[in-house]
Amino acid sequence: MVEYYDNDFSFEEHQLEMEEKLQSMPSTSETAEQDTIDDDEHVKLHPNTQAQCWDGFHTSHSTGNFFKPRRYIMKCFPCILDHCATEDSTRMGRPKRLVLEVGCGSGSSCLPILRNCSENTIILACDCSAKAVDVCKSVVQSSTDAKNFGAFVSDPSLESDESDTYFAQDVKRAHRQLMDETTTIDDAVGLADIVLMVFVLSAVPPKRV
């Protein structure tokens, strides 16, 4: 018998553990001497560098078959289905519920949601890798009805001076393009009903989380 769980650790215990680690970290003055040493590591961990690495990965696996559809998503997180499969009408004046996936990769999480949720649910997927977004679009379009799906390139870990637009603006623009909206949404904050991040935060340097 297989059992599924929403989480595999206590978030409260993890929070306390991280707080203890942060308190034991050296102060800014103590780490100043490490700036030169950390420069190379900074380049390696910079989002643009990581995006290039993911571009290379998804170029090598452009068919999208490397990662199989995560059918377990709906079992592990039935709240997605409970929230999106209902015919409950509107939220903030919008007729469809929105699932936003950050770090969509080749679309392995998008597919089971699109297949299981009702017609009143749309999915917006984004990734820092332009190649990943292309693969994701191709996989979804060839596997299911993609009328409620949109994908775009964006990286929420970028600082304001590292990108021409804010992440919220990218989400807002993608939503408008998919819905062909003529009305103005004043603020993209709170636009998504559910935000999905599978194996994403572990790939982001702590300073950018």
Image (cartoon, rainbow, N blue to C red):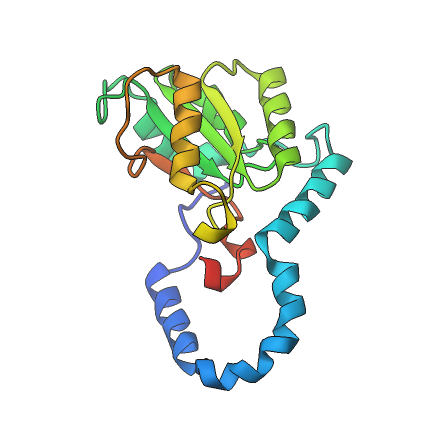
Q: In the visual, does 47 lie left or right of 209? A: right
Q: In the visual, does 154 lie left or right of 64? A: left
Q: In the visual, does 41 lie left or right of 23? A: right
Q: Is residue 42 above or below residue 75?
A: below
Residue 191 percent location from the top left of the image: 31, 33
Tell me if I can see residue 12 in this picture: yes
As rendered, which of 113 and 54 lies closer to the eye?
54
Work out which quarter of the rendered image holds the C terminus and state it. bottom left
Residue 52 percent location from the top left of the image: 68, 46
Residue 208 percent location from the top left of the image: 47, 58
Q: Is residue 103 above or below residue 87?
A: below
As rendered, which of 171 and 204 lies closer to the eye?
171
Q: Is residue 40 above or below residue 169?
A: below
Which residue appears at 48% of the width and 36% of the height? 73
Residue 59 percent location from the top left of the image: 74, 35
Which residue appears at 53% of the width and 56% of the height? 204
Tell me if I can see residue 26 in this picture: no
Q: Is residue 136 above or below residue 178?
A: below
